[in-house]
Amino acid sequence: MSISMYQASIPVFIRALNVLSTLLEKGAQHAKENGVDPQTLLDAKLAPDMLNLVAQVQRASDTSKATAERLSGVPAPRMPDTEKTFDELHARIAKTVAFLKSIDASTLQGSEKRTVTLTAGDYKRDFQGDDYLFTFGLPNFYFHVTTAYDILRHNGVRIGKQDFIGPFEPR
C-alpha cells in the first residue's frame, strides 16, 4: 500500500497542531497554579538568538499552512503575527486547523511531482513536491513544534514525551 502526499502532510499537521494546543493549555495551567506571569512563558526562549514561545507557535502555524498551500494550490489564510496571549495562540492554531481540514485530498494528487519554489530575499530554490515535504516542510514544522515543547519544559511545565507524541487514535 502506498501513502499519499495528503496522508503524509495534512493529517500529520492537524494532529501535531492539536498536540501543540494541548501543550499550551498545560503551560497556561502551570502559570496559573504556580503564580507565574503567563507573559514569562510566552516570552521565553531557549537561547538569546532564538525566537520566543509565541513566535515558535506562529512559525508552526505558518509552516503547516504554507506547505499545504504549496502542495495543494489552495490559498492559505494570511495571519498577522499579533498574538500575545495563550488564548490568542489557541485561536491561531484553531484557524490553522480549520484551514487544513478544508483541504480536499484530491488537491494534493500528483503534488509529489509538482515544482515548489521557495524564495526568501535573494534565496530561491526549486524542489520537487515530495522532496519539499520531506526535506523542508515537515522538518521545519516539527522544529518549531519541538522548540515550543522544549521552551515549556525548560520553564518547568510538567510535560513529557507522551504529551509531545499525543494520544493514539486508531483509524
Image (tube, rainbow, N blue to C red):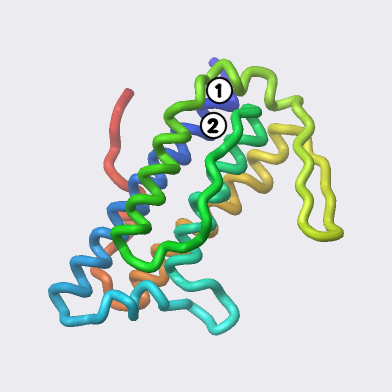
Residue at horizontal 55 percent and vertical 23 percent from the top: 3
Task: Classify the position of the N terminus by image quarter.
Answer: top right
Task: Classify the position of the C terminus by image quarter.
Answer: top left
Binning the other alpha carbons within 10 Å of mark 1 as few (below 14), some (14 to 19) or many (20 upward) gives few
Q: Is mark 2 in CB contact (under 8 Å) with mark 1?
A: yes
The residue pinned by badge 2 equals 8
Q: Nearer the viewer, residue 137 or 57?
A: 57
Q: Nearer the viewer, residue 124 or 141?
A: 124
Residue at horizontal 40 percent and vertical 43 percent from the top: 95
Give the left or right position of residue 119, taking residue 17 as reference.
right
Binning the other alpha carbons within 10 Å of mark 2 as few (below 14), some (14 to 19) or many (20 upward) gives some
Residue at horizontal 27 percent and vertical 71 percent from the top: 157
Residue 68 placed where, x, y %?
A: 58, 35
Residue at horizontal 65 percent and vertical 28 percent from the top: 73
Under circle 2, the secondary element is helix
Q: Is residue 34 visible?
A: yes
Amino acid type of disc 2? Ala
- Label tally: 2
Q: Is residue 162 visible?
A: no
Q: Nearer the viewer, residue 73 or 26?
A: 73
In the rendered image of this protein, does residue 115 appear above or below residue 80? above
In the rendered structure, find residue 3 and report the number of the disc placed on it: 1
Q: Earlier in the sequence, mark 2 or mark 1?
A: 1
The image quadrant that residue 48 belongs to is bottom right
